């Protein structure tokens, strides 16, 4: 296996690409405004952000063998890797780790894509989808646990590539598929658990595919000697358990319970699988109707992703086992993350939540390319099949681009119908109103004003029929052109709603317009011909209308 890898690495084209990526990474790192020490006004750079600050604090604590609970929040593997470099690179302990992870990610993608489209096409797809894609490449510069996750997932894909080549070769499988190879793939996949526990499910899908293929190879070669297969699976399971054991052991030592504070906080923020359809439409196509974030859909930023989505469908129906498995892993990545209550179109770009999905981008580009190649091949082989597939692609593409959310208003009222009074603490004002309509998804309040940060992250409080709801898990407050939108994560059926906004928000003394409503799925003009502003015309507000007085 190593001989094959080194032969691949000797390719001059690949050496040029790796040199280019290393140089680009170093230059972009030095020029990135968020890099610590670059911006005079904000010398901390990304260490002043919550996630990155936690990584650094944990890495420094580990370097000093300090395992007090207050020093560690995130899973331990990424800070542990950084702790080895804190002494020599105190402001950049994750620089080399992230660079090596990126290079391995690049190598594996080029190796895999070269099996289907040729090496230079693979390099071009990688370049366009990642290397010159500011939002994606920039998230390989910023310290994120997802960078090392991309490398570990790539290790499992690397093992799958080797098994694929093994099946298509005339070599003796039992000599090439060594126990150490199975152990290596298993331990690297299992290490995703103490890195990003949710992503471990994606790695588990790839690992199960790897083990199934390994079992098939070994069974073929050992029909009458099946006892020799058992050590492979023994070391595979052992390798997979190393990461979870480290995760549980560290959390038990530091926090006193197995899952640690990070997993607990993730569950506390809310996870609603029933919202998967709405989140898919909002994140990919329409982030404005419900969340009022202009041009925030993935398709807005990368129109070619529509080909990638259709390419996934085509690969799942016509691709080989390896491509299908990667397509399933990508689907799992989105299915796992979209239901999180704190993953909104508002944070996808503003707060770089796009990094959750960065490893998928070159593979999505590959699937889009393979879709085009498939149609060309069908045209050459059978005009009838071509028109069938082309009809499927075009109709499905138009359908996806036409997906929308639509707001249906339930009621509207003026301030005379609303009770406005002092809050229970700090003199905050409260807004109490009665909503008799069932399945209310949102309340729009015109006249409640504040800047984006104060509205989006404000310490708002909400009671539904006397029971307090929790911000993020149960409701969000979003900036709107007319004021704010109070969005419920799950529809509510309530008689009395009491809302206490953050005191930094300003409530007008003049007439306040309040509307309640719900959303539903609908079809509209395809994405390129759709004006987002039309989504708010039904609210009764005119953009720019003055509804409050300072």
Image (cartoon, rainbow, N blue to C red):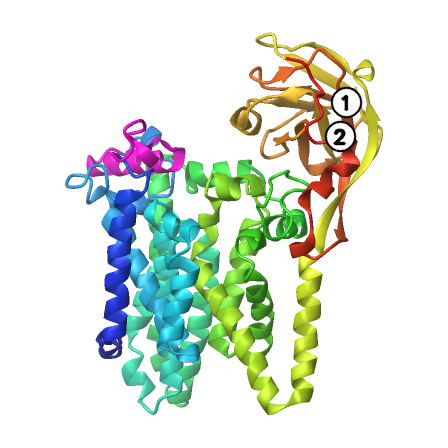
Q: Position of residue 220 (x, y in %)?
A: 42, 88
The reply to whether the magenta stretch includes residue 118 is no
- Establish if 460 lies above or below 85: above
Res. 203 mark? none
Q: How many dots with numbers?
A: 2
Q: Position of residue 229 (x, y in %)?
A: 37, 79
- The quadrant in which residue 449 appears is top right
Q: Residues within 10 Å of mark 1 (few under 14, many from 20)?
A: many
- Counting residues from the start of the chain, the first of labels 1 and 2 encountered is 1
- The quadrant in which residue 22 appears is bottom left
479 and 253: which is toward the camera: 479
Q: Are marks 1 and 2 in contact (CB under 8 Å)?
A: yes
The residue shown at (49%, 73%) is 323
Q: Secondary structure at mark 2?
A: loop
Res. 513 mark? 1
The residue shown at (84%, 32%) is 437
Does the rendering let one see residue 160? Answer: no
- Establish if 420 lies above or below 72: above
Q: Position of residue 195 (x, y in %)?
A: 37, 49
- Establish if 55 lies above or below 356: above
Does the rendering let one see residue 530? Answer: yes
The residue shown at (57%, 15%) is 503
Left or right: residue 448 versus residue 100 is right
Left or right: residue 175 versus residue 411 is left
Quarter occupied by the N terminus: bottom left
Left or right: residue 187 versus residue 426 is left
CA gap between label 1 and label 2 equals 9 Å
Q: Secondary structure at mark 1?
A: strand
Q: Position of residue 371 (x, y in %)?
A: 55, 74
The residue that mark 2 highlights is: 541
Give the residues drawn in magenta, as a range.
37-66
Of tags 1 and 2, which is closer to the observer? Answer: 2
């Amino acid at each position: 296996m190593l001989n094959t890898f080194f032969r691949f690495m000797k390719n001059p084209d690949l050496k040029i690409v790796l040199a280019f990526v290393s140089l680009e990474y170093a230059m972009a790192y030095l020029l990135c405004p968020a890099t610590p020490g670059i911006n005079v006004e904000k010398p901390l750079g990304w260490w002043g952000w919550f996630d990155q600050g936690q990584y650094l604090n944990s890495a420094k604590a580990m370097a000093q063998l300090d395992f007090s609970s207050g020093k560690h929040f995130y899973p331990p593997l990424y800070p542990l890797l950084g702790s080895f470099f804190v002494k020599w690179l105190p402001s950049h302990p994750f620089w080399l780790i992230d660079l090596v992870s990126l290079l391995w990610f690049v190598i594996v993608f080029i190796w895999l894509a070269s099996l289907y489209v040729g090496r230079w096409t693979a390099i071009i797809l990688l370049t366009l989808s990642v290397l010159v894609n500011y939002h994606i490449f920039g998230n390989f510069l910023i310290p994120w646990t997802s960078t090392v996750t991309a490398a570990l997932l790539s290790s499992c894909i690397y093992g799958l590539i080797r098994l694929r080549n093994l099946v298509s070769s005339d070599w003796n499988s039992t000599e090439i598929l060594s126990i150490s190879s199975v152990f290596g793939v298993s331990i690297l996949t299992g290490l995703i658990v103490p890195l990003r526990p949710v992503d471990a499910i994606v790695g588990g899908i790839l690992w199960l595919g790897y083990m199934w293929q390994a079992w098939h190879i070994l069974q073929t070669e050992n029909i009458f000697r099946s006892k020799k297969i058992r050590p492979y699976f023994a070391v595979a399971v052992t390798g997979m358990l190393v990461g979870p054991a480290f995760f549980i052991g560290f959390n038990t030592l530091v926090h006193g319970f197995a899952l640690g504070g990070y997993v607990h906080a993730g569950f506390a923020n809310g996870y609603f699988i029933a919202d998967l359809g709405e989140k898919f439409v909002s994140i990919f196509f329409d982030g404005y109707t419900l969340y009022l974030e202009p041009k925030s859909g993935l398709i807005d930023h990368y129109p070619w992703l529509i080909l990638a989505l259709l390419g996934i469908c085509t690969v799942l129906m016509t691709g080989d086992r390896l491509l299908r498995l990667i397509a399933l892993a990508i689907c799992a990545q989105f299915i796992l993350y979209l239901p999180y209550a704190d993953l909104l179109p508002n944070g996808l770009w503003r707060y770089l939540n796009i990094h959750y999905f960065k490893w998928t981008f070159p593979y999505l580009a590959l699937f889009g390319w393979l879709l085009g190649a498939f149609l060309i091949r069908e045209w050459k082989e059978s005009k009838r099949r071509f028109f069938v597939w082309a009809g499927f692609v075009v109709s499905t593409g138009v359908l996806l681009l036409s997906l929308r959310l639509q707001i249906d208003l339930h009621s509207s009222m003026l301030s005379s119908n609303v009770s406005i009074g002092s809050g229970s603490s700090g003199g905050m004002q409260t807004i109490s109103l009665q909503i008799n309509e069932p399945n209310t998804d949102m309340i729009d309040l015109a006249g409640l004003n504040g800047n984006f940060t104060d509205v989006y992250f404000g310490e708002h409080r909400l009671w539904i029929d006397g029971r307090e709801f929790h911000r993020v898990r149960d409701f969000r407050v979003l900036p709107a052109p007319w004021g704010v939108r109070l969005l419920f994560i799950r529809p509510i059926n309530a008689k009395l709603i009491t809302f206490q906004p953050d005191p930094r928000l300003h409530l007008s003394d003049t007439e306040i317009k309040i509307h309640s409503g719900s959303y539903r799925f609908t079809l509209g003009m395809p994405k390129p011909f759709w004006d987002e502003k039309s989504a708010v015309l039904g609210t009764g507000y005119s953009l720019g209308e003055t509804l409050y007085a300072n």
